[in-house]
Every structure is written in C-alpha cells, then in structure tokens.
C-alpha cells in the first residue's frame, strides 16, 4: 500500500512521494492495524498544526492528495 500511494503521488504531482516517518502520538489507524487491516495515514497539511488554533490546509495540497487517492484507487481496481 505504501508503494502504491507513493507512486501515485509522484505520478499525480510530478514530485517524489512524501517522506515516510513515524509519529509520537496515537490516532485511529492504530485500531485498524491492530485488527490486521493494512493502514496508511496520508493527507494534506502539517500534522504539527493539527487540531490547533493555527490549523490550516493549503488548497493545492488538498488537490494533490485527492489526485493521489483517485489514481491509487484506479490502480487498485486495475483500470489505470
């Protein structure tokens, strides 16, 4: 899944995929992972600002993520 999303991001945006990293906080994907469901957290914005008064997401970042996810779904479905 990680390679699928990274490659889709590169193809959708013309930029290398986002860097892979861990995070020092808990979030809901851990529940899916614990149940054996492959899980990847991927989205726009700066996680350091998440849920704060300064939280914001740039529109171009939303467009990049949307394009990436659409391309990843199409590739998973075998249509592209």
Image (tube, helix red, strand yellow):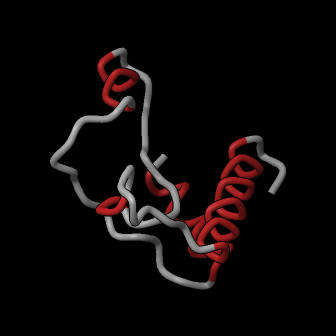
Q: Is residue 10 above or below residue 49?
A: below
In this rendering, position of residue 23 left or right of residue 11: left
- 33 vs 62, nearest the viewer: 62
Residue 11 pos. (x, y %): 65, 75
Residue at position x 58%, y 68% from top?
9
- 4 vs 40, nearest the viewer: 40
In this rendering, position of residue 72 left or right of residue 10: right
Residue 46 sits in which quadrant?
Answer: bottom left
Q: Name the residue furthest left.
A: 24
Residue at position x 24%, y 35% from top?
26
Residue 70 sits in which quadrant?
Answer: bottom right
Q: Name the residue furthest bottom.
A: 14
Residue at position x 54%, y 67% from top?
57
- 26 vs 53, nearest the viewer: 53
Residue 10 pos. (x, y %): 57, 75
* Badge count: 0
Residue 24 pos. (x, y %): 15, 48
Q: Is residue 77 above or below residue 33?
A: below
In this rendering, position of residue 44 left or right of residue 77: left
Residue at position x 84%, y 50% from top?
79
Q: Name the residue furthest top.
A: 35
In this rendering, position of residue 59 left or right of residue 25: right
Residue 59 sits in which quadrant?
Answer: bottom right
Location of the C terminus by quadrant is bottom right
Q: Name the residue furthest right.
A: 79
């Amino acid at each position: 899944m990680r390679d699928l999303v990274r490659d889709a991001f590169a193809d959708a945006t013309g930029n290398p995929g986002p860097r892979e990293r861990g995070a020092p906080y808990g979030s809901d994907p851990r529940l899916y992972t614990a149940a054996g469901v492959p899980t990847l957290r991927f989205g726009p914005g700066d996680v350091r600002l998440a849920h704060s008064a300064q939280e914001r997401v740039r529109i171009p970042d939303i467009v990049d993520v949307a394009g990436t996810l659409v391309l990843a779904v199409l590739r998973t479905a075998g249509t592209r």
